[in-house]
Amino acid sequence: MNEFAPVLDDEAIAVARVLANDHVADVVEALNHEPHETAVELLCAVPFERLVEIFDQPELENAPKLTEALPRSKASELLTAMSVDRAADILRELDAAARSELLGALAPPLRATLLSILGYPEGSAASIMTTEFVSVPSDWTVGRTLDYIRKVERTRETVYAIYIVDPETQLLLRATGLRRLITGEPEDLILSVAPDRMPVTVTPLTDRETLAQTISKYDLLALPVVDHGRILGIVTVDDIIDTMVEETTEDVHRFGGMEALDEPYMKMGFLAMIQKRAGWLCALFLSEMLTANAMQSYEGELEKAIVLTLFIPLIMSSGGNSGSQATSLVIRALALREIGLRDWWRVALRELPTGLVLGSILGVVGICRIMLWQYLGLYDYGPHWMLIAATVGAALVGIVAFGSLSGSMLPFALKRIGFDPASASAPFVATLVDVTGLVIYFSVALVILRGTLL
């Protein structure tokens, strides 16, 4: 841990003064574009309250490294003043030695709270919750509660949700909003202004996806994390937005056929980027080799009817595109809980006729294209051009239908065996449909063109 603040020149001090007056989001964005040493210098120069605001922003990149670079006394003071959930996020990313050093400099109650949060699995409700919430006994009045909120407002993550607990057992009884308190009479008991129903809660091990769905479903600003009836903390909507952005980014990376990046794109090292992308590319390349094997199996047919090779890219891309469409729709529906594993047969019954209709549309377009080129003299497909057009049209129907069906079923299969459905990436689906598409194409050609070109 660095015990000495960097020596600041006049220019750095001037910039720090400007940063102290800008919106904190703009300050964070500016710091993210500065070299590490410059960012540390600027952070050491800004007022302490501003420093807390900056580190409380999840968008601040390399926050653990920046914290570690600060003088130990300032770093411990910073962690004490920050929101508990954000402090836990920073400590979680530090190495064990630095984390132990910083925790040892904190007050025992705060250290115990942070250790409790750090003990939960990453991504669970308890790992991103804050213990800075407003809770009051059920025998308090509205007036007393409002006085209490005025006193603790600066030390709480949010005051819009007030949780009412039993004064003896500390069990969560009700939850109410600040609006109900303001409109209530000061002498009324707080229970009398709270909605007469148990609040929506989650357990400490609830995953982030379920948290987001629960907050969205019940239109909540904060969601209490409860263990055996006692409230441990709350997860606020801004925390969920931040975590869901991270999770969505990971899914998009996987859907693109690569491992999820651990850092922003421009911050990733060259070798790390190669490592993240090479594995999937090699796997997809080896899978695509099956396409060559399929074409080798029909080498004789290709020699007799070389014209069939003109439509291979068209056939393969159409099947891959339809499969990718179906995969995208099903993965999103699974993520939003619109469908579950037991709905696979309903999806299959929906995608099969959809694929047949879409394939028929593309088949008609393909036939019209061949006819137009033949009549306009742009290309001569030979005396059996009508049979070739029929082959392309019929093959498109089968390939697009198969692509839609297989693309919609692959996410179910992956989810059933415990993998992330996002792993059913568009490249993977396209590879699968490419191989089977060639088999369908040449099988249809053997049936229609037998006795003529074949």
Image (cartoon, helix red, strand yellow):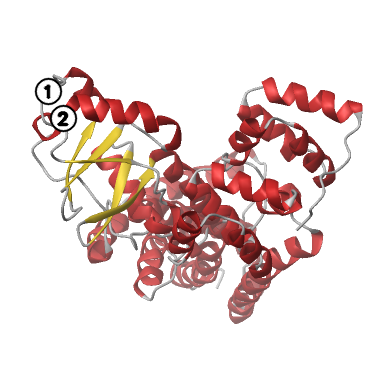
Quarter of the image with the C terminus is bottom right
Residue 355 occupies which quadrant of the picture? bottom left
Answer with left or right where residue 306 lies relative to residue 3. left
| Of the pair 446 and 128, the residue shown nearer to us | 128
Disc 2 on helix, strand or loop? loop
| Residue at image location 16% in from the left, 30% down from the top | 141
Position of 190 relative to 434 (above/below): above
In the picture, measured across the screen, residue 204 lies left or right of residue 200, that is right
Residue type of the residue flagged with mark 1: Glu
Instruction: Give the labeled residue for mark 1.
Output: 187
The answer to which of 348 and 20 lies nearer the viewer is: 20
Please report contact status of discs 2 and 1: CB closer than 8 Å, yes or no.
Answer: yes
Q: Is residue 323 above or below residue 100?
A: above
Indicate the position of residue 83 as horizontal and vertical percent values: 50, 43
Q: Residues within 10 Å of mark 1 (few under 14, many from 20)?
A: few
Residue 190 in percent (x, y) is at: 15, 32
Residue, x 54% and y 43% (percent of image)? Answer: 82
| Left or right, 202 with reference to 91 | left
Residue that numbered label 2 is attached to: 141
- At x 38% / y 33%, what residue is drawn? 152
Look at the numbered disc 1 and give the secondary structure of its residue: loop
Gap between marks 2 and 1 measured at Cα: 6 Å
User: Observer-nearest residue: 364 or 413?
Assistant: 413
